[in-house]
Image (tube, helix red, strand yellow):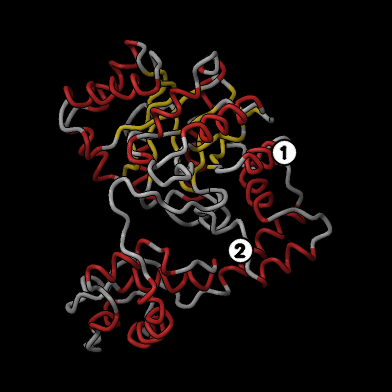
């Protein structure tokens, strides 16, 4: 296992961080998580050199922290750092923040949390956290020894990331990043900004929820033609670890074989390890994926709200993802939500308001017709959105 610097913190952590969000349910279907299997996987990762374990209050219907706490008994807690998170929607004042933190400590069976994150914030959630005194609470809890590092995970555009990361004395940040997301969310600009500030970066969605783990034919052809043979998973992780600003890359595993494969991959990576030829390959791979794009929608939402209730950017997002990554729309939550809310393109009356507002000058009306003709056959096979406690299907690696 390779170990990497955590920026200004002056510590090192494993390049491979185990994400504890995607454990499988019990074989009987009675539990959202197979505890014994999950505990075995966690300990297998730690025994292999993993020191960074990531969970959250809400993961796996609030059971992930409990299972992680059990796995870290018998001396395992002393060998790792734990990251968990405070969700904005569950706290409204300092009393509730303290109660939630104490609940997490109890579940994890520990007296401190190493990396404590404000969960999935954008500017709106950051302003909310500030309004209820969360930054001061984090400072106080760090002084009290209940947390070691003040952190946040982020989903939002770069300008919001730039504001948030410079608005408080953060110790670490977690962002979505992969070779397809160089200009999405915080993106490469955000990664590099954090590096200049000395703030270590932990990566989530390194495989884009598993979508980059299996390459479509035109992408696989590029991998196959390259002199060095690696799996799509290894190429994706190698590309991430090439960035010196990255401290840890999270990967969620359901099987021992996935743990072992990740341990092998992360024993071979270093900052700045990729050759010019390898970087060119990844640029070509990105272009090959993008060549499969159905429509150049950027999700800016200038076309919204549609006067007839069509979720235009949502429709195009699903349509593009089906083409780019070969996902099954029947398993896409966004597609299911559009169906349940009646936001589908069949509501379009071709008023043209969307096309007049689109800064990309897209042929939205024709695009909606084409998208719907491809997605509509899936409707009769779409299962309903999952209910609380329901076991969700997992990607192989994420």
Of tags 1 and 2, the one toward the viewer is 1
Secondary structure, mark 1, is helix
Residue most toward the top?
144
Query: Which image quarter is the N terminus in?
Result: top right
Give the mark nearer the N terminus: 1 vs 2. 1
Which is nearer the eye, 109 or 30?
A: 30
Number of the label disc, if any, that sits on residue 91: none
Q: Residues within 10 Å of mark 2 (few under 14, many from 20)?
A: some
Give how far apart the Cα atoms at labels 1 and 2 are. Answer: 25 Å
Secondary structure, mark 2, is helix
Whether residue 309 sits left or right of residue 185 in the image: it is: left
Residue most toward the front?
28
Q: Is residue 362 visible?
A: no
Residue 361 at x, y percent in the picture: 37, 80
Vertically, is 332 above or below 83? Answer: below
Whether residue 225 sits left or right of residue 45 in the image: it is: right
Which is nearer the eye, 37 or 331?
A: 37
Residue, disc 1: 264
* Quarter residue 318 falls in: bottom left
- Going 46% across and 25% down the picture, which residue do you hit? 82
Vertically, is 205 above or below 93? Answer: below
Residue 324 at x, y percent in the picture: 54, 69
Residue, disc 2: 286
Q: Is residue 218 visible?
A: yes
Vertically, is 138 above or below 248? Answer: above
Q: Residues within 10 Å of mark 1 (few under 14, many from 20)?
A: some
- Going 39% across and 39% down the picture, which residue do you hit? 153
Residue 136 at x, y percent in the picture: 25, 22
- Going 67% across and 58% down the picture, which residue do you hit? 282
């Amino acid at each position: 296992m390779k170990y990497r610097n955590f920026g200004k913190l002056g510590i090192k952590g494993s390049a491979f961080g185990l994400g504890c969000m995607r454990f499988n349910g019990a074989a009987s279907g009675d539990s959202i998580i197979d505890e014994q299997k999950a505990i075995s996987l966690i300990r297998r990762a730690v025994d292999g050199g993993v020191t960074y374990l990531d969970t959250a209050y809400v993961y796996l219907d609030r059971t992930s922290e409990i299972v992680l706490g059990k796995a870290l008994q018998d001396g395992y807690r002393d060998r790792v750092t734990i990251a968990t998170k405070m969700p904005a929607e569950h706290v409204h004042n300092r009393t509730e923040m303290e109660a939630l933190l104490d609940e997490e400590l109890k579940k994890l069976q520990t007296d401190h949390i190493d990396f404590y994150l404000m969960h999935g914030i954008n500017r709106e959630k950051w302003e909310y956290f500030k309004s209820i005194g969360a930054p001061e609470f984090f400072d106080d809890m760090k002084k009290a020894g209940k947390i070691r590092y003040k952190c946040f995970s982020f989903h939002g555009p770069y300008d919001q990331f730039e504001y948030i990361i410079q608005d408080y004395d953060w110790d670490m940040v977690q962002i979505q990043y992969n070779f397809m997301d160089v200009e999405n969310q915080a993106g490469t600009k955000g990664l590099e900004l954090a590096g200049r500030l000395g703030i270590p970066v932990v990566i989530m969605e390194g495989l884009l929820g598993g979508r980059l783990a299996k390459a479509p034919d035109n992408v696989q052809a590029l991998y196959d033609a390259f002199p060095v043979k690696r799996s799509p998973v290894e190429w994706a992780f190698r590309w991430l670890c090439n960035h010196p600003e990255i401290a840890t890359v999270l990967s969620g595993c359901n099987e021992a074989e996935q743990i072992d494969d990740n341990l092998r991959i992360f024993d071979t990576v270093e900052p700045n390890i990729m050759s010019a030829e390898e970087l060119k390959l990844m640029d070509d791979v990105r272009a090959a994926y993008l060549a499969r794009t159905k429509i150049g929608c950027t999700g800016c939402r200038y076309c919204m709200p549609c006067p007839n209730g069509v979720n235009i950017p949502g429709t195009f997002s699903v349509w593009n993802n089906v083409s780019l990554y070969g996902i099954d729309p029947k398993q896409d939550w966004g597609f299911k939500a559009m169906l349940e809310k009646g936001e589908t393109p069949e509501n379009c009356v071709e008023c043209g308001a969307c096309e007049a507002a689109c800064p990309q000058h897209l042929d939205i009306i024709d695009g909606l017709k084409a998208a719907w003709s491809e997605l509509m056959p899936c409707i009769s096979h779409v299962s309903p959105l999952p209910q609380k406690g329901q076991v969700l299907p997992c990607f192989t690696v994420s």
